[in-house]
Image (cartoon, rainbow, N blue to C red):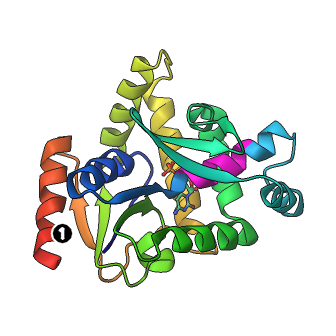
Amino acid sequence: MQIAIDGPASAGKSTIAKLIAKKLNFVYCDTGAMYRSVTLLAKNHNVDYGDSSSILKLMNSHRISFVNKEDGQHVMLDDEDISDEIRTEEITNNVSQVSAIKKVREELVEMQRNMANNINIVMDGRDIGTTVLPDADVKIFLIASVLVRAKRRYKENIERGINTPLEKLKEEIAARDYKDSHREISPLVKANDAIEVDSSNMNIEQVVDKITKIINENK
Ligand code: C5P
């Protein structure tokens, strides 16, 4: 069974997708982490975020993978754990430029399809229901208002010791949404057969319950 969860930045996709995967004993795949890893590769090698041929070369000489540990899923670049490094502001604010590169998308989409082959999986991203897994059994489009998403990010940041003003976070989230939904290849868009869930006025447990109910109804 394949479950696709798409939606804009900071809508809570990965938190929800992880919990649902755990509940159903499915594999979880965070495709955003893969685009973030490629962005980190470019940064570490001083390659411009728009330099597609250099980024492609870097991708072909390094390996991105996921490892499941007791405290959750870790993202690896070759043998290095980059789970924290891919969440910095620098990466967050530049990943949309890298993810708009056609060849980057082609390579990562192929990896994602291979990962989803023949297993029960919950995959989250921007184009899972439209492009990566168009035949997914259940497609969820998870949204929330920009203000709610910025407030959630603000709280997360404070817990990590980062103090970015709420207004700036709102602007950054809106800018990333704009770039992700206006790019030429596989833009962020709700698949025709996706079910929209607005989490603006729901807590995590309520969203998990709602999506679990939708999955059970569509099994
Ligand atoms: O989900 P997350 O916020 O970690 O995604 C980071 C970025 O990766 C997105 O803003 C988008 O540019 C890109 N992305 C994508 N397609 C996906 C998942 C993420 O283009 N399936």
Q: Which region is colored magenta?
A: 33-40
- Tell me which residue sits at (60%, 54%) in the image: 34
Q: Horizontal and vertical percent for residue 94?
A: 67, 45
The residue wearing badge 1 is 215
Neighbor class of circle 1 (other Cα within 10 Å; few <14, some 14-19, many 20+) is some
Query: Percent from the top left, x then y, of residue 104?
Result: 71, 65
x%, y% of residue 26? 31, 60
From this view, report whether residue 40 is shown above or below residue 135: above
Measured from the top left, where is residue 141 in percent x and y? 32, 65
Q: Quadrant of residue 156?
A: top left
Mark 1 beta carbon near ligand 1 (under 8 Å): no
Predominant secondary structure in magenta?
Answer: helix
Instruction: Describe residue 9's horizontal placement relative to residue 148 as left or right.
Output: right
Residue 50 versus residue 16: which sits nearer the camera? 16
- Apparent side of residue 58 relative to residue 82 in the rendered image (left or right): right
Taking 166 as reference, is 198 left or right?
left
| Quarter of the image where one finds residue 56 | bottom right
SS at mark 1? helix
